Amino acid sequence: MGWTAEQLAMHTGELIKDAGLLDDAGRAFLDAAAHVSGISPDSAMSREGGLGIGDHGPAAQFRAVIAVLDANASSVGQDLVDVGFILQQMVRDVSGVDEAAESGLKDIASRLEGCHR
Amino acid sequence: MSAELRKAVDSLARTAAIVHLWSKELEDNFFDIWPIQPDEVPGVFEPFLSMPTEKSFEPLITEVTSAMALVSNGTGGAGAELLRGFTGANPAMGYVSQVGHDVTRWEGAAQAAFDDIYAGPFEVPVRPNQFLCLAVLRSSLFAEAAIWKEAERSVLDLVQQAEKALYAAIEDDGSDWGFALTVIGAVAGVVSTVLSGGTTAPVVFSVISAAAGVGSAAVGETQQAPGALPGMVVAGMLDGVDTIKRAITAQETKVRDGLDDFLGALEQSAPHLVFQRSSLTERPGVLEVPA
């Protein structure tokens, strides 16, 4: 059984609004990646006089792990941001949007531009 | 390095100089068995004066903890050993399933793709694995910090006991020479929490605690003359330094090996750590109103 015009309007508005939440979820992963990529283990682990393993201990291993986590969290975050935007576009294409939803889309688009920079 | 250790090393060096002089004056035919001269004592501890400190890891741990809070849904996902008191949660982590619920009321290829590629995998394994990986990184930073915290404590203990033993050596009347050597033999151990390998689905890392016993300087019956006792104390002190150095290397090797194992697990688990990009993002497909 198909949707009535009233149901379509309700579901359309709901999905557009909630798809925007994917932007928040994605941005959390992008922020997490920024936190991780911002740390530098070399200075914390540097030492002199041959203590432990090398002049910087296992800093190289830490850097490698950080790079992988940064890339993964960035990938997940960007995908969530992108898919949220695409979902909103789809719903708009299918049913059109009211003025409020259009405004929301523009807001998301603006934030996406910042994200992609 | 702490000012306390610097001060303790300086004090030990002064005491060593006094005791060395006393040893010479005690016997007319003093045979110097000191393995190093008093003015060389500070140099023995010089590497420890520039070693990392527990505090130097705090900013790194803070950053990783912040990242964990961003991707946590507050329902755990990692063992208590990995969480170490972490209790953060981000409501935004529930948004994906909320959108997934909305989308199921639509039809078309995009609806199926969103559910199969994003909403489902986000709940398990993508988000939990991302959180777990951050928890492992944080835990390994804790492990490295613990090594240096215990190293500092061990070295400070050694320096203070060495000085105490030297005083005991010159104050002793010869009836209980073993005391001084016993004191220097009680060197503290270096204990650290280190990472262990081991993976199960989706990705599970465990943490174990390992204690590295630190040997003591040779202590036993001695028939040396009183003037020789301080030299034996200094020899024991040098043994203690070597033991602490070996313990640091052994523990740090465990951290390095644990991280290597972790990197291997990350590589093997790569498909479970990110979304498998779908036609939803590359080709939007269709999202249809139910007919």
Image (spheres, coloured by chain):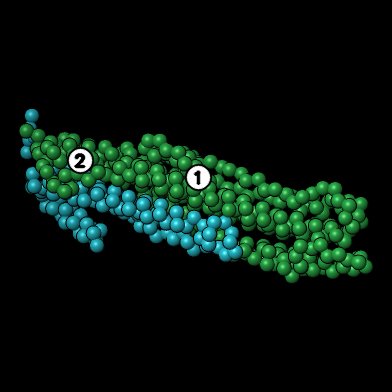
Chain colours: A cyan, B green
Horizontal side of B263 relative to B166 (left or right) equals: left
Dot 1 corresponds to which residue? B195
- Relative height, residue A113 to residue B17 (above, below): above
In front: A42, or B34? B34
Q: Quadrant of the C terminus of chain B?
A: top left
- Residue B73, position as x, y percentages in the image: 36, 42
> Label 1 lies in what chain?
B
Mark 1 or mark 2: whose residue is earlier in sequence: 2
Q: Are marks 1 and 2 on the same chain?
A: yes
Q: Name the amino acid type tagged 1.
A: Leu
Residue B80 drawn at (x, y percent): 49, 39
Measuring 11% from the left and 47% from the top, which residue is drawn there? Answer: A92
Q: Please state, as top left, top right, bottom left or bottom right, where the N terminus of chain B lies in the image.
A: bottom right
Side (left or right) of B37 relative to B116: right
| Nearest the eye: B81 or B247 | B247
Front residue of this view, candidates B261 and B18: B261
Secondary structure under the numbered disc 2 in the rendered image:
helix
Secondary structure beneath label 1: strand
In this image, B39 relative to B256: left or right? Answer: right
Q: Which of the labelled discs sits on residue B114, or is there none?
A: 2
